[in-house]
Image: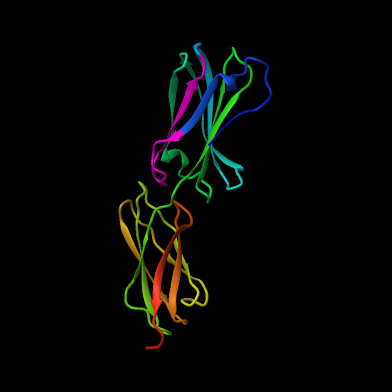
Amino acid sequence: MTEKIIHSCKSPCIHEELAGEFKLVSAREIGKDVILNLSLTNLTTEAKLVNVDIRAASVLYTKKEINELLKEHQKVCIEGCEGAEIPVVITYAIYENLLTADNSIEVTAACSSESYDGVLIVDTNVVLDNPKFEIKLKKKARLNKPTEVDVVFTNPLKKEVSNIVVTAEGSGLLRDPITVKADSVKPNETITIPMTIQPYKAGNKYLLVDLSTSGFQNAKGFLDIEVPDGE
């Protein structure tokens, strides 16, 4: 979260008169509305009428903008030595099909006033967490024997998700990654996706699992598996 001025300015300069920051007030979860408050503070004793242009966009990890999610303009009068909060709401309905695989949203506010030179930029980046899932070992792992594993996923989203793809890998557990596909799952419905591994090395191993659907990409999970030496 940063605050900066975008060009040199003559006195009086707005970044010496006004301070701001974004505060996230909602959960960082895919499927939930993203709610922030833009908090602005008047650093002087004189009241200010501030123009605020707010934008939000889905971005890559490089900060390259991909899809615009929100664009709005507001005016707020802030009394001397006081503050004001402007709510910013990005609903799930807005961003659900527009996120990148990084689940990253960049939110920016450009604050200006006719009485002051310059533009104060306040920005923040919100990275949303993918839904969780469970990985269950159905029975004790055995060296060089097929072992069944269940991936259990409950859909927390408000919509049905489809194109479910589960990929698993793990040194000592799988010589090559395996992929299993599953059908759609409705909101709050639970699906169990069976997989079979065959441990080929003894010791403590990690099964790494990636779960992707039409509603989100690359949810990660892992299971610690102890493989006994011999029978």
Q: Is residue 30 left or right of residue 70?
A: left
Looking at the image, which is closer to me, 84 or 94? 84
Q: Magenta segment: does it hold 207?
A: no
Q: Is residue 160 above or below residue 85?
A: below
Range shown magenta:
23-44
* Color theme of the render: rainbow
Looking at the image, which is closer to me, 168 or 194? 168
Q: Is residue 185 visible?
A: yes
Q: Is residue 217 above or below residue 152?
A: above
Give the residue furthest to the bottom: 231
Looking at the image, which is closer to me, 122 or 128? 122
Residue 66: horizontal and vertical position, in percent?
Answer: 58, 42
Residue ID at (45%, 53%): 214
Residue 33: horizontal and vertical position, in percent?
Answer: 40, 39
Residue ID at (56%, 40%): 67
Q: How many marks?
A: 0
Q: Is residue 107 visible?
A: no
Residue ID at (41%, 84%): 143
Q: Is residue 125 above or below residue 132?
A: above
Residue 6: horizontal and vertical position, in percent?
Answer: 65, 28
Q: Magenta segment: does it hold 39?
A: yes
Tell me which corner region of the image, top left, top right, bottom left or bottom right, holds residue 122. top right
Residue 100: horizontal and vertical position, in percent?
Answer: 53, 48
Quadrant of the frame with the C terminus: bottom left
